[in-house]
Amino acid sequence: MGGTRRFLALLPLLVLISLANQAEAIDISATGSWSPTTGTSDLILGAGSELKDSYESEVDQMVVAISNTTGSSDDWRVDARRSDTTWHQNFTISVRRMSAGTGTGIISGGATYQAVTASDSAFYSGAGDRSGVKVQLKISGVSLAVSPDNYSTSIVFTVVDI
């Protein structure tokens, strides 16, 4: 049986980095990682066809917590950016907030997928301490046109006191 089998590995796709806004007392922590892989079972119509274009993580793949605020009226914003290790320009990694978590404050925004770029951009906002905020990930742009390799990036979350 001739032919070639292509395999695109995306290991590890995501390693989380937690940052705190150093000028303010508010802290952020994020936990979770995601390592999707592609193989022959991901071919849309079997041998000789294209791979599925996108893959989604579990809805609670990452969990974010905001702590050390001055109370339920202490407003903040969570920014997200990508920090590439080995990445391909065809890929887009996106995030969306899947829960409000728990705590004394409020939370809003981030409920739809947002592409994460190499520059900080607002993801969601809130006030007061919030824990257990679930975040889902999605990668798109997967294709047989991308050379098989291990691709890796990190998502950096930063909390900004506003």
Image (cartoon, grey):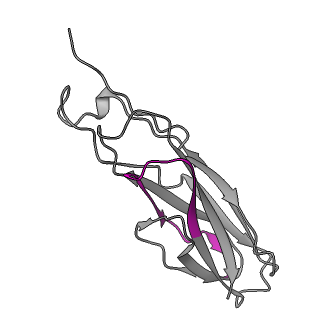
Q: Quadrant of the C terminus?
A: bottom right
Query: Where on the picture, by quarter, is residue 48?
Result: top left
Hey, which residue is sitting farthest bottom in the picture? 73
115 relative to 62 in the view: left or right: left
- Determine the residue positioned at 46% across, 34% down: 149
- Total marks in image: 0
**Per the image, is 100 magenta?**
yes
Q: Is residue 5 left or right of residue 62?
A: left
Q: In this view, does 14 lie above or below 102?
A: above
Q: Residue reaching furthest top?
A: 1
Q: Position of residue 14 (x, y in %)?
A: 56, 48
Question: At x 64% / y 71%, what residue is drawn?
Answer: 102
Decide whether residue 9 is among the magenta residues. no
Placement of 92 over or under 127, stated as above or below: above
- Nearer the observer, 147 or 23: 147
- First to last magenta residue range: 80-106
Which of the 4 quarters of the picture holds residue 159?
bottom right
Q: Position of residue 85 (x, y in %)?
A: 58, 47
- Can the viewer see residue 106? no
Q: Which of 152 and 99 is in front in this view?
A: 152
Horizontal side, residue 139 vs residue 26: left or right: left
Asked if residue 78 can be seen in this view, the reply is: yes
Q: In this view, does 142 lie to the left or right of 66?
A: left
Along the line of sight, which residue is nearer the eye, 5 or 126?
5
**Residue 10 spot, x, y in % from top left:** 47, 39
- Which quarter of the rendered picture does the N terminus lie within? top left
Q: Does residue 59 sit above or below 119 in this rendering? A: above
Can you tell which quarter of the image residue 111 is in?
bottom left
* Residue 149 in the image: above or below residue 136: above
Q: Where is residue 97 in the image (x, y as percent from the top left)?
A: 50, 67
